[in-house]
Image (cartoon, helix red, strand yellow):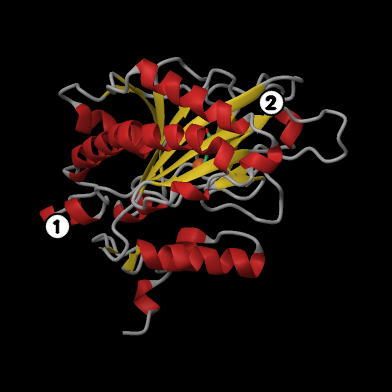
Amino acid sequence: MEQQAANGGGDGDRELEELELPTLDIEQNKLTEQLVAACRDPGVFRLVNHGVPGDLTARLFRLTRGLFELEPASKSRLPGYFWGTPALSLRVKELNWVEGLHVDAALSSPDAAADRDDAGAYTAFKKVVTEEYVPHMARIARKLFDALSVSKELCLDAEQRASYLEEHGGTFRAYRYPARDPAAAVQYMGMEPHTDSSVLSILNQDLVGGLQVLRRDGEKKETWCSVRPVAGTLVVNLGDMMQAMSGDAYRSAVHRVVAPSSPGTERMSLCYFAFPEEHAVIRHPSGCYRGFSYGEFRERVQADIKATGAKVGLARFRVHDRSSAPP
Ligand SMILES: O=C(O)CCC(=O)C(=O)O
Ligand SMILES: [Fe+2]
């Protein structure tokens, strides 16, 4: 994989070619057809007419910003707060130039864990995330997944359609990427190159820019391209579970975030990750992966990160040469 210095992207990505994302209206009649094309290549697309009210997004960005603006000692006590640690599945050797708030939509973490002075602000944030924003994300994920599930690449039966996308799960993360210090000796990436472990991820970025996708041009050539922020749209990228479910017909997109370099600029994003049910065994008729559950995949990823500092991911489950495999 081509590696580019973290500071190669200017403010976001001035020097990079832009990736022209397919733009999909989720209420259109030919959704399956257009989704299949977008999932085959480039595995990332833009959504319009998605039904998430603009004022809800604006309110959630405001509430999130309020929490990130707290004193470091206060915000570090917020439930799910982290600084510089990996996202869902990243190398842990390098610091990421990002802080975040992680909310597990399936669990209701006790808000009492928030610092007493900031409990009101955190409770308001969490309420908007769990009661308003995440239900929209779960609705969109289900709609996209159902449209894809009838494609010949997935061809799921009713049970798989239900269990390959957990109805009430999902993880929400709000991120803030502060400006990097151009004079610092080490220039950290906002978020290092990775694939998501999800079925699909729905990103709502502000207008600063910095999200980049690795475009594959044929077998050998790979180029980092920028994903231009467009107001009112969402960006969806496929994750490893979708790649496995489709027997590699769809690819989980390698992506990264370059933190801004202009002093005083910061980037924020609201991200939702949809997963399969923990124990549902994922199989595809092609047999290119052995059957495995998301629970097993996650444990394997965590074990690899612990042992080597890096995610191995789907390669751990790939069946290389079935003709010589033991019976
Ligand atoms: O901040 C973003 O837009 C992307 C974050 C991301 O890729 C992740 O959390 O996996
Ligand atoms: Fe990601």
Inter-mark Cα distance, 1 to 2:
44 Å
Q: Position of residue 199 (x, y in %)?
A: 35, 48
Q: Is residue 66 above or below residue 310?
A: above
Residue lying furthest bottom in this view? Answer: 327
The residue under the point 51% across, 50% down is 113
Q: Is residue 112 above or below residue 125?
A: below
Residue 102 visible to an observer of this rendering: yes
Q: Is residue 55 above or below residue 285?
A: above
Q: Residues within 10 Å of mark 2 (few under 14, many from 20)?
A: many
Q: Nearer the viewer, residue 20 or 80?
A: 80
Q: Which residue does the numbered mark 1 point to in the structure image?
A: 159
Q: Secondary structure at mark 2?
A: loop
Q: Position of residue 86 (x, y in %)?
A: 60, 50
Residue 318 visible to an observer of this rendering: no
Q: In terms of image quadrants, where is residue 151?
A: top left
Residue lying furthest left in this view? Answer: 158
Specify whether tag 2 is near ligand 1 (CB below 8 Å): no
Q: Amino acid at mark 1?
A: Glu
Q: Amino acid at mark 2?
A: Pro
Q: Residues within 10 Å of mark 1 (few under 14, many from 20)?
A: few
Q: Position of residue 186 (x, y in %)?
A: 83, 41
Q: Which residue does the numbered mark 2 point to in the structure image?
A: 260
Report the quarter where the C terminus lies: bottom left
The residue under the point 44% across, 52% down is 197
Q: Is tag 1's residue or tag 2's residue first in the polypeptide sequence?
A: 1
Q: How many marks?
A: 2
Q: Is residue 156 above or below residue 173?
A: below
Instruction: Tell me if 101 is positioned left or right of 261 in this view.
Output: left
